[in-house]
Amino acid sequence: MSPLEWYFPESVDEAAALITREGVVPHGGGTGLLRGSLKGYRGLVALHRLPLKTFAYTPQEARLGALLTFSETVEHLAPHEPRGLLVQALYHSSTELLRNRITLGGSVAMAPPWSDLMAPLLALRARVVLRNPQGETVVPVAEYLKTPGTYRNTLITEIRYTPYPGKAFFYRAVRTRNDLPAFTLALLLRVEEGRVRDPRVVLFGTRGKGYEATGVMERLENQPVEAVDPEAVAQALDAAFHPHPRMGSPEYQQHLARTALARGLQQLLEATP
Ligand SMILES: Cc1cc2nc3c(=O)[nH]c(=O)nc-3n(C[C@H](O)[C@H](O)[C@H](O)COP(=O)(O)OP(=O)(O)OC[C@H]3O[C@@H](n4cnc5c(N)ncnc54)[C@H](O)[C@@H]3O)c2cc1C
């Protein structure tokens, strides 16, 4: 077995070139890589010297560097959107030790079903900035997930999204705080002139790479707030789940998801004047 080589590039260009080599991959927080066997890898590219802990925020666009950890992301975002979707989701993710290591870039690249990051990014219709030796491209997170092979050997350098001018609710399907979620649910909505506008409901950890509950969203769009029956709307959620060792059958998880959605709708609509 050949020894694993570590690389310590000083620039994004250098890192982007290194990861085009066979078996050489980026190392963000290392929590995903080091959980596995590393069999088949020839080299790890440490990203910590790269200028990718950047943060910029305007009402038009948030830009989050790929090397920000979950904890750093919450610290940066909380002053701008204290009850925002990413703040709610990442503040409660895993444990403090892990939140101090897990990076945004590594989480998008790995996108494990228990991710606390992916449902919020999909609901926010976020984009990833990718670098390879040919240059930079920006693609929707949803597209990155659908065709992972296309983006192999590219470095995620940034995540961008348009801040959502409404309310957010996030649910993790766990039995105890430190469990890996069986699935997560992200809900965004706003109310204008007494009507629901631009509702977004996304689940992650279901079958497929993310599930947008379009049936639910259609039932909510443009409805007068007082006409929305959260319990009835939530019944339109029809995601497909995997059986889960702790959270039970697909039917039970569907029930959990509908209950969480009804509670989220209730909470956000009550909080709206
Ligand atoms: C015990 C445990 C519990 C966890 N619980 C949770 C949880 O509850 N919720 C949650 O959301 N996460 C949780 N995680 C984290 C999750 O499982 C992944 O380990 C994490 O998202 C990976 O991020 P990382 O920065 O550590 O990536 P790394 O381990 O560094 O890399 C993961 C993959 O991404 C690639 N990669 C890394 N950075 C980049 C980049 N910038 N561009 C392109 N590719 C890149 C790597 O080559 C590798 O293939 C947990 C992890 C552990 C070990």
Image (tube, rainbow, N blue to C red):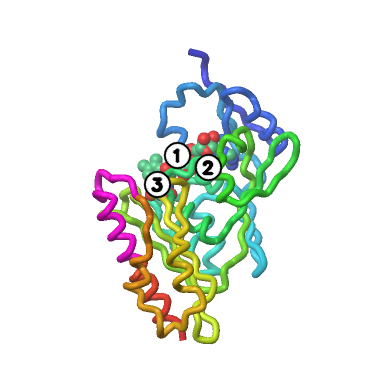
Q: Quadrant of residue 90 in the image?
A: bottom left
Ligand 1 within 8 angstroms of badge 2 C-beta: yes
Task: Determine the residue positioned at 39% across, 56% down.
Answer: 184
Q: Which mark is residue 207?
A: 3
Residue 58 among magenta residues: no
Mark 1 or mark 2: which is in front? 2
Span shown in magenta? 241-260
Q: CA distance from mark 1 to mark 2?
A: 9 Å
- Examine the rendered structure and indicate whether residue 84 appears above or below residue 197: above
Query: What is the x, y in percent for residue 74?
Result: 50, 59
Q: Quadrant of residue 19 in the image?
A: top right
Quick check: 208 left or right of 58? left
Query: What is the x, y in percent for residue 30?
Result: 48, 37
User: Front-most of 90 and 98?
Assistant: 90
Mark 3 or mark 1: which is in front? 3
Query: What is the x, y in percent for residue 84?
Result: 50, 67
